[in-house]
Image: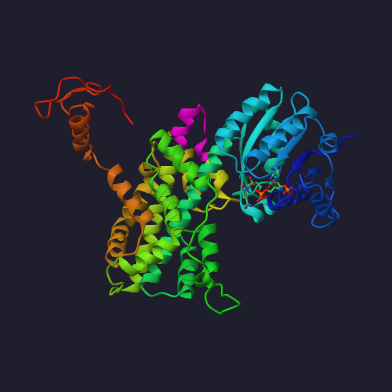
């Protein structure tokens, strides 16, 4: 007699913790893993004394599941997901559900959803965020895929998800790859948030502050509008000491950043759709630049910049940095939601932006008070075209603006790279420009490639070409916009 409410394949850090979380909430879970010995290790270790059912073959695993069978994969993203889909499909029946909870690329999820549905089954691709701690005590869960599957997983997912203001940080996102797209965008925003905090750290370091002093500053910041998980953990990181050397832990860590790809995917998607996701793009490139450690060390001996001597009032400067960080963060989220809107139009998803902000409000890495403001903005009757135009954010940026400009100026003076702070400001200045220098750009394109231009004194959609040199012909290139 099948007993399990859900089955989970993949007993690494995320899988084990999510299973224990489901068990705590009264669900019976069957588990399986490619390396089968890990099933028994888990049952005799972390899962000892629980109702978790260990299985040692795909047949036994599927046989333990109540119908409709819910098979969740939490394995390494990529081929492993396709391999397990192939392995479980022959054992499933119409209406059974395969759920991929890993960090899969949304394009793979779109493909897999179509394939699994063609076999008479249902598919969910869901983002699960919050790392080990989140999986164990309440992650943010962002499911998308076959709409008919939602009612069958909703009670489980919403029970185990984090709660923010009493509401589960989990709701249906949309069809096929929507869940994984939203999770990807979450990770891109996470890249941006982390880079912004790193730039604040770098500026405070440049004016002579110690990690311990910075930790105290972040503790203060965390009491105000910057209140967030990432500020909180950075406060603790900056206070930590290396047991081996006694130095600040942050000072003994090599300055080369890794990445697993979700930030890059976010940037690629933005470029594909023509969305100016500049801050996240800079955050990804900042990691790439950090990885060129040997080249940077060599260049540091040869390429000169200004002396890093700061003469101003340090406390005032730190307050300016806080304001600049907040304003830049608003820009990053405004850009992130621009991307989601474009993706919704491109893929035909009916995204609920307020719901997405709520899903990110708790449980995940970018959780913050600030997301409550975004949820409020999207809960209004008239959906804003851009977060920057919402009165709360408009006024927050107005208040922070002078400080933000002072920080970027000071960074340039000191020779401290602040690609996220400065690109955010450049975006703000461009987005609020009624006229940009693209008129000249169009003239250049028309000059060398006969790409044509529109005129300010003629209706949109009429294209003109000038024979700039007197020697070119009147033939124009096909008109396109990019
Ligand atoms: P990993 O991403 O390290 O994956 C480990 C699991 O994948 C193990 O069960 C392993 O089986 C299985 N696996 C591998 Br590796 N290659 C396989 C293959 N070719 N065929 C079948 N199974 C294979 O685990 P994780 O860190 O727990 O992450 C799980 C998923 O959740 C990933 O997609 C990850 O990106 C995502 N995620 C992780 C975090 C995090 O903080 N770690 C946060 C959010 C999302 P084995 O035991 O036999 O090697």
Range drawn in magenta: 340-354
Residue 352 forms part of the magenta stretch: yes
Q: Residue furthest left?
A: 470
Number of callouts in the render? 0
Q: Position of residue 482 (x, y in %)?
A: 33, 31
Residue 44: quarter of image: bottom right
- Left or right: where 263 falls relative to 102: left
Q: Is residue 482 visible?
A: yes
Q: Is residue 419 above or below residue 442?
A: below
Q: Is residue 42 above or below residue 386?
A: below
Q: Position of residue 9 (x, y in %)?
A: 75, 42
Residue 465: quarter of image: top left
Q: Position of residue 474 (x, y in %)?
A: 16, 20
- Left or right: where 272 falls relative to 434: right
Q: Is residue 381 visible?
A: no
Q: Residue placed at 52% from the left, 75% from the top?
A: 248
């Amino acid at each position: 007699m099948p007993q399990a409410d859900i089955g989970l394949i993949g007993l690494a850090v995320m899988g084990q913790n999510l299973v224990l979380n489901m068990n705590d909430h009264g669900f019976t879970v069957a588990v399986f893993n490619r390396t089968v010995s890990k099933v028994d290790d888990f049952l005799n270790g972390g899962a000892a004394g629980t109702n978790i059912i260990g299985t040692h073959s795909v047949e036994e695993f599927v046989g333990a599941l109540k119908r409709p069978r819910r098979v969740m994969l939490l394995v390494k993203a990529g081929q492993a997901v396709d391999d397990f889909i192939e392995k479980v499909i022959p054992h499933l029946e119409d209406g059974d559900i395969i759920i991929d909870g890993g960090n899969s690329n949304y394009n793979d999820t779109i493909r897999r959803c179509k394939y699994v549905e063609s076999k008479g089954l249902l598919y969910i691709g869901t983002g699960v965020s919050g790392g080990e701690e989140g999986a164990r005590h309440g992650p943010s869960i962002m499911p998308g895929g076959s709409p008919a599957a939602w009612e069958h997983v909703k009670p489980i997912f919403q029970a185990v998800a984090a709660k923010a203001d009493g509401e589960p940080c989990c709701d249906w996102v949309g069809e096929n790859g929507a869940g994984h797209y939203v999770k990807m965008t979450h990770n891109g925003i996470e890249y941006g948030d982390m880079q912004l905090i790193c730039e604040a750290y770098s500026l405070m370091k440049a004016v002579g502050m110690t990690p311990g002093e910075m930790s105290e500053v972040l503790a203060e910041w965390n009491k105000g509008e910057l209140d967030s998980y990432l500020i909180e953990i950075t406060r603790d990181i900056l206070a930590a000491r290396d047991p081996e050397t006694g130095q600040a832990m942050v000072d003994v860590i090599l300055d080369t950043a890794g990445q697993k790809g979700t930030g890059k995917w976010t940037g690629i998607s933005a470029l594909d759709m023509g969305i100016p996701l500049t801050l996240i793009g800079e955050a990804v490139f900042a990691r790439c630049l950090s990885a060129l450690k040997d080249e940077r060390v060599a260049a540091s001996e040869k390429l000169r910049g200004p002396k890093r001597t700061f003469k101003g009032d340090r406390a005032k400067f730190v307050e300016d940095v806080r304001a600049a960080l907040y304003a830049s963060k608003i820009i990053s989220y405004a850009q992130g939601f621009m991307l989601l809107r474009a993706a919704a139009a491109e893929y035909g998803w009916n995204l609920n932006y307020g719901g997405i902000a709520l899903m990110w409000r708790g449980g995940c890495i970018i959780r913050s008070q600030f997301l409550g403001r975004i949820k409020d903005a999207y809960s209004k009757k008239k959906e804003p075209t851009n977060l920057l135009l919402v009165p709360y954010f408009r006024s927050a940026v107005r208040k922070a603006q002078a400080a933000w400009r002072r920080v970027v100026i000071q960074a340039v003076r000191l020779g401290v790279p602040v690609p996220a702070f400065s690109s955010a400001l450049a975006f703000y200045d461009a987005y609020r420009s009624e006229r940009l220098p693209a008129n000249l750009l169009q003239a250049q394109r028309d000059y060398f490639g006969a790409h044509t231009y529109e005129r300010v004194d003629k209706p949109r959609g009429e294209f003109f070409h000038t024979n700039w040199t007197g020697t070119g012909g009147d033939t124009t290139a096909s008109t396109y916009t990019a």
